Image: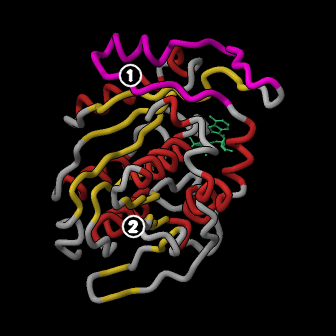
Amino acid sequence: MRKGNLDQVKHVLLVLSGKGGVGKSTITTELALAFRHAGKKVGILDVDLCGPSIPRMLSVGKPEVHQCDSGWVPVYADPQQQQQLALMSIAFLLEDSDEAVIWRGPKKTALIGQFVSDVAWGELDILLVDTPPGTSDEHLAVLENLRKHRVDGAVLVTTPQAVSTGDVRREITFCKKTNLKILGIVENMSGFVCPHCSECSNIFSKGGGEELAKLTGSAFLGSVPLDPLLTESLEEGRDFLQAFPESSTFTAIS
Ligand code: ADP
């Protein structure tokens, strides 16, 4: 295990969700772009073994990962930009995207441990860690390895209806048990923005994230509506990257 790769990283934030498909990777990507837009040096560590989707969202494909003396060299999304966005994803190291799903626990946790300590990030203001959904050994492995450095806290992503299922509550219990500070809760897919008239309708419900934040004494960071244009932009990562923040509903949070 290499030491010191996180020494020049000022802040480490984890992005967590109770279950998959609620928009954790979307919010991680938007957070990264919002921080970059604010002039920060940002990195994303994508350890979501169940669905490492950040490379697609940022349109970096599956590049060859190079090694230097201090570890793996991150891939840079949009390298023409002065304010670069560094990325390391588990997807870069897999032969095919379904491979990690069949790994046994120890192999997963060993890879995560290596992943967390072996990326040569250089100087970063913020490193965002996109974790797998739920609470698992993989989360503990991430925390255990990051704690050698320092973790500032976690941003929890939920959908309005997920709030009532208890998945997020389990996530909150996990944070409390592991002394991981909850920086705040984001409600994603909160209503639907009509592509024709731009009106936002609440298909499921609204306000659950805020209610949960109040109940748990956490900060409510904001709500992001379901926006078909956002889904489209994320499929075509490069457009999203170049058009941010205009392409984004994320201003709801930032
Ligand atoms: P998770 O990381 O929680 O599994 P993703 O971020 O991969 O979820 O999102 C799942 C799907 O939902 C993706 O296709 C993404 O583009 C889409 N999506 C997420 N949030 C929104 C949103 N606010 N508006 C429109 N599409 C969204």
| The image quarter in which residue 173 lies | top left
| Colour scheme | secondary structure
Q: Amino acid at mark 2?
A: Leu
Q: Is residue 219 left or right of residue 7?
A: right
| Image disc number at residue 111 | 2
Which residue sits at x=58%, y=63%? 55
Q: Amino acid at mark 1?
A: Phe
Front-lying residue, 250 or 110: 250
Where residue 56 sits: x, y (%)?
64, 60
Where residue 10 sits: x, y (%)?
21, 56
Question: Where ligand 1 lies, by quadrant?
Answer: top right
Which residue sits at x=34%, y=26%? 172
Question: Is residue 212 found inside the magenta-colored segment of the image?
Answer: yes
Where residue 135 sits: x, y (%)?
40, 38
| Mark 1 element type | strand
Height in image: 32 above or below 15? below
Quadrant assignment for the C terminus = top left
Which residue sits at x=41%, y=43%? 15
Height in image: 64 above or below 206? below
Front-lying residue, 49 or 228: 228
Height in image: 111 above or below 36? below
| Image disc number at residue 220 | 1
Q: Is residue 87 visible?
A: yes
* Callout in the foreground (2, 1): 1
Boundaries of the magenta span: 197-226
